[in-house]
Image (cartoon, helix red, strand yellow):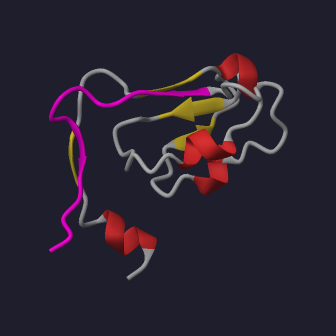
Amino acid sequence: MGVQDSLETVQWDVSEAAHITVDNDYCVTCEDKPCLHLCPAECFDYQADQKGGIYFAYEPCVECGACMVFCGNDPEKGAVSWSKSEGGKGVEFDFG
């Protein structure tokens, strides 16, 4: 089963508050923008009209943490800030 097939089995209870935010001030200096290629849920999109070029949609996020690992513009923080979804919200995997 491919990634896209697996994503079709995922369910979300989306919170009104984003659990991930992207600071586009850091994205401006990032030449490679790995987030555009490494997010399995394709939450990141390049849009020239955005301040740093990155538009992030948190709703389809599968909470894998790849964006935290690969965003390295700032050695201590990066452009991505991640927190837990509010209680009971977020992604729900069905392993059955």
Q: Is residue 85 visible?
A: yes
Is 18 positioned to the left or the right of 41 in the image?
A: left
Relative to residue 89, is residue 83 drawn left or right?
Answer: right
Nearest the eye: 34 or 48: 34
Residue 70 vs 6, above or below: the answer is above
State which quadrant residue 49 falls in.
Answer: top right
Where residue 69 appears, as percent x and y from the top left, is 62, 45
The quarter of the rendered structure image containing the N terminus is bottom left
Provide residue 4's location: percent of width, then percent of height. 41, 69
Give 95 or 36, whichever is nearer the viewer.
95
Q: Is residue 63 left or right of residue 33?
A: left
Rendered location of residue 76, percent (x, y)? 71, 25
Tell me, yes or no, whether the highlighted magenta stretch contains residue 11.
no
Reply above or below: 14 against 96: above
Q: Is 40 drawn above or below residue 70 in the view shown?
A: below
In this rendering, position of residue 45 left or right of residue 91: right
